[in-house]
Amino acid sequence: MTGPQPVAGTGVKSSSTARVSPLLHAGDGALRDRLFSWLILGCALAVLAILVLIVYELLIRSQLSWHAFGWKFFVAHDWDPVNNQFGAMPFIYGTLVSSLLALILAVPLAVGVSVFTTEMCPKSLRGPLSFTTELLAAIPSVIYGLWAIFVLVPILRVYVQPFLAKTLGWTGLFEGPPYGIGMLAAGIILAIMIVPIISSITREVLAVVPQQQREAVLALGATRWEMIRMGVLRNARAGIVGAVILGLGRALGETMAVTMVIGNRPEVAKSLFAPGYTMASVLANEFSEATGDLYLSALIEIGLALFIVTILVNALARFMVWSVTRGMPTKSHA
Amino acid sequence: MPDRTTSPPRIPEISLWRRAKDHAASAFAALTVVLVLTPLVAIFAYLVVKGIGSINLAFLTQTPKPPGEIGGGMANAIAGSVLILGIASLVGVPLGIGSGIYLAEYGRNRFGNTIRFVADVLNGVPSIVIGIVAYAMVVLRQKHFSALAGGVALAIMMVPTITRTTEEMLLLVPTQLREAAYGLGVPRWRTTLSIVLRTATSGVITGVMLAFARVAGETAPLLFTAFGNQFWNWKVDQPTAALPLQIFTYAISPYDDWHRQSWAGALVLIILIVGAVAAVRIAVRRNTLGGVA
């Protein structure tokens, strides 16, 4: 059950310990074996303990806020530490909108890049291309934020936002003064940050689509694009959706880069030009300055909500990626 | 499809419309590559250009000047980062490797699957939430911010990554090696440490370095654990400056000189991460070549 066992001696206690041949260090080895397996088990238990601790601390320390506001906490709009009024709606809204905006921008790019690297580009380009996109994932969040403040935001303010206001201003999504900083900037920097995650997993998923699928579609006289659409993308659907959800999970919890460019104003505004606030960035900005137990408790409750949402999103994503890469029929998830 | 990279032969059955769509799709895919690589190139270009011009001896040897004053540096933040990362590695690396060994050698059962799942869940927890937990566990008990709290937060983030990569690497070691050791009468613990772990050393180290590189640039969990400090600090139980924290504080400040130092800090951070990863990899390669292989 647990791999090969020592040949000599009889198993003392199930699989984790075994007696060593009396020819070598009689008796001594069995004791050390048992100690070692306990030590190792202890490490594994520590991993479990970490998760239990996270849940415990978040639950216990958010009690005060939970008793004070109940479910209303998640729909109330006012965030007023001075008067001890706490509602998380502006932050939930900001997190959702910035993450969705990031997905809308990142998904076509990420899928395009993975299709290009797995199906179109010459083999010699494949390695360097995957490597460079992966490099994006290695850049610390705070450096993305730094770059966004001094490069992306000015570009948005001077070129992109006036253009959007002129052409798409009638939708109401792009109106108001072009600060540069705001929901749009947050969405764009998030998109740049989640493209590598989505594309690396999409690449993995595309790679497990059987070669015969491609050959069969080509043999029917399809062009390359039709082959990719019918033979590859359709088969990898569930896995790609999984990759996208995994990207969403990352976007929801992303803190520093967003905090640096979103404007940090707890308001619900329709326009993407307006400053906003996210659950992660309110924690980053206010946690160390929170005075009063209720204030701190309310912040921790936001952390708890963020924790629960990201866990659910990640579990769903892993299940979907797994369903493809383990060769389960994709149809059952369509 | 290698034979498809040249333009398809003119077969009458393929209509103009379908061929146009094919070309449009290729063009779109190529365009996405350009769009994705542009920010990458831009970020590195800005880092190098703005960073190199701002790094000088003062930056690397002095502590920060009061707000608004020109000059000063991030020496204490670099030292603080080393301290915090040292604590994190001291706690996180043994734990992660240990639980990885458990999963690979003892964990083919339901409990092992649970641990595997938990490690994956932990991997997805936002770093800011880990910060809250470290705050609740360490800062609230100690009553003040400390390097230890920052180290604990980063250690929690390192463990799941190291666990899963260690497991993967150990599973790559052929079963025959274990059997050969058992056949010679080597006890199991010794087989695991001296044969299995030794064989997989370079893979395990790669996993450790991945985890290290990931947490080295983390800022969010340090905000209310290590907290930052304008002065030198080598005490584990005192608030400590850290390079990513300093980059953040300076970047959102209103002073031009601090912005300049922020770029310099970012460049130093990237160099430290890449340098640490490269150094360990070279050292490991030399060791395994002389040792096992």
Image (cartoon, coloured by chain):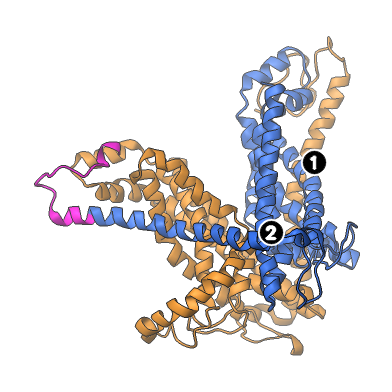
Q: Which labelled disc corresponds to residue B218? A: 2
Determine if the magenta segment contains residue B13: yes
Most distant residue in the left direction: B12
Whole-percent x and y of residue A121?
A: 35, 44
Amino acid of disc 2: Glu
Q: Residue at x 85, y 62 (%)?
A: B146
Crowding at mark 1 (Cα within 10 Å: few <14, some 14-19, many 20+): some
Q: Mark 1 points at which residue?
A: A42
Above or below, B174 relative to A268: above
Above or below, A250 relative to B163: below
Mark 1 element type: helix
Q: Is residue A87 left or right of residue A313?
A: right
Whole-percent x and y of residue B233?
A: 88, 60
- The chain under label 2 reads B
Which chain can be seen in blue?
Answer: B
Most distant residue in the top direction: A23
Quadrant containing the N terminus of chain A is top right
Q: Residue at x 56, y 69 (%)?
A: A148
- The chain under label 1 reads A
Residue span colored magenta: B1-21
Which chain can be seen in orange?
Answer: A
